[in-house]
């Protein structure tokens, strides 16, 4: 368990919902602020942005290595993609102040050390490491040294790579780690979600777990809660306008609101593990079977098998006592429809 801005994240707490703005501001700071406000109204726990520039991500090159040949961004070189998608550094202070003004936690994904430095100046309460950076152990070390909670996505990673990232955090004394199970496909297919890996991450690495979800519905996220996910990150967009390269796998505000409500319901529905019965069941106990007299009998009569039955409702003795009652002597008169109780029997 750990906290982000006094909100507890762990197995005994409802899922922590992070709305990922990513590139869905469409290059417009007003749209970014409107999106943050909508995320707040939707009920999320935090909104997250991304902190990089094209130059901190890559170089401007049209060599084969730098060209994207398939998927949503086919035809771009990497520099062009990041130039279109990035959140300008000069926006960050304004966005952080706006989120704090409306009392919504905001943090970011840094992609290099200069981004960490900027976020430290803004007193970010947490950090997210993207799947593509999980093998950048120098960046993870630099970030983890700030001793703030670390959300780490595991897309494309094998167990050794994940272990290296976790160990890097632990070595600098940062134990506040959550691993996001993640499928790095955009959008990801529900059938490829491999949600059972959530339990693997929790059991194998002994840290909190969550889901960074790139599917286009909420089903994977809700299912993940039943498997132990206690944080969910989901890309969202303000509306259906084409607002950037991430918009096609981002959910709308009504879906984001549903995610907040339904994930909490899923948590409440699956948290029990000790056969504790809900109080709402008590009212129906009276409709269980119990033992009733089905004949009128006199004081002193010997109880025979056909004098009693196991029937509904449940105000008589439990059915398990049926055989034990045969041959008992009545200490008072009884009538058909009376519940059997020990105080009328010798």
Image: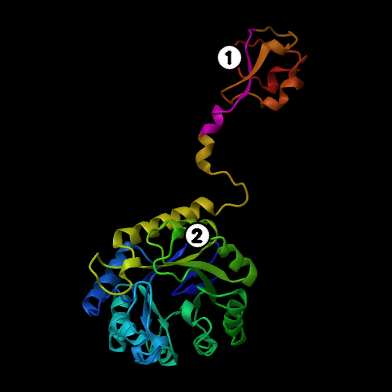
Q: Which range is magenta?
A: 284-296
Q: Quadrant of the N terminus?
A: bottom right
* Magenta stretch encompasses residue 293: yes
Q: Residue at x 24, y 64 (%)?
A: 240
Q: Secondary structure at mark 1?
A: loop
Q: Residue at x 31, y 74 (%)?
A: 245
Q: Give the percent coordinates (x, y) of residue 68.
A: 38, 80
On the rendered structure, is 340 left or right of 227? right
Q: Is residue 182 above or below residue 53?
A: above
Q: Earlier in the sequence, mark 2 or mark 1?
A: 2
**Observer-nearest residue: 179 or 274?**
179
Residue occupied by mark 2: 224
Q: Give the percent coordinates (x, y) of residue 72.
A: 34, 72
Residue occupied by mark 1: 337
Q: Is residue 312 above or below residue 8?
A: above
Q: Is residue 341 above or below residue 269?
A: above
């Amino acid at each position: 368990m750990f906290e982000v801005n006094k909100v507890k994240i762990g197995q005994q707490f409802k899922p922590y919902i992070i709305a990922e703005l990513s590139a869905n501001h469409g290059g417009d700071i007003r749209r970014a602020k409107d999106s943050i406000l909508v995320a707040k109204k939707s009920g999320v726990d935090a909104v997250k942005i991304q902190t990089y520039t094209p130059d901190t991500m890559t170089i401007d090159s049209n060599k084969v290595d730098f060209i994207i040949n398939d998927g949503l961004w086919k035809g771009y070189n990497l520099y062009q993609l990041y130039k279109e998608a990035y959140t300008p550094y000069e926006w960050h202070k304004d966005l952080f102040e706006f989120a704090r003004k409306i009392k919504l936690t905001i943090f970011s994904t840094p992609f290099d050390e200069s981004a960490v430095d900027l976020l430290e100046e803004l007193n970010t309460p947490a950090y997210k490491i993207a799947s593509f950076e999980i093998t950048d152990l120098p960046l993870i070390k630099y970030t983890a040294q700030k001793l703030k909670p670390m959300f780490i996505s595991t897309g494309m990673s094998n167990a050794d790579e994940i272990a290296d990232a976790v160990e890097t955090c632990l070595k600098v004394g940062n134990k506040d780690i959550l691993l996001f199970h993640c499928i790095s496909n955009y959008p990801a297919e529900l059938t490829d979600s491999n949600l059972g890996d959530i339990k693997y991450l929790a059991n194998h690495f002994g840290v909190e777990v969550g889901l960074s979800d790139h599917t286009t519905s909420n089903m994977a996220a809700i299912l993940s809660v039943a498997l132990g996910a206690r944080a969910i990150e989901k890309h969202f967009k303000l509306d259906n306008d084409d607002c950037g390269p991430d918009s096609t796998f981002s959910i709308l505000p009504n879906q984001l609101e549903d995610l907040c409500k339904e994930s909490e319901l899923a948590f409440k529905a699956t948290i029990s593990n000790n056969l504790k019965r809900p109080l709402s069941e008590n009212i129906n106990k009276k409709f269980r079977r119990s033992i009733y007299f089905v004949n009128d009998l006199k004081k002193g009569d010997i109880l025979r098998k056909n004098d009693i039955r196991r029937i509904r409702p449940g105000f008589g003795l439990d059915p398990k006592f049926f055989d034990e009652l045969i041959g008992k002597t009545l200490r008072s008169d009884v009538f058909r429809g009376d519940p059997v109780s020990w105080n009328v029997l010798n």
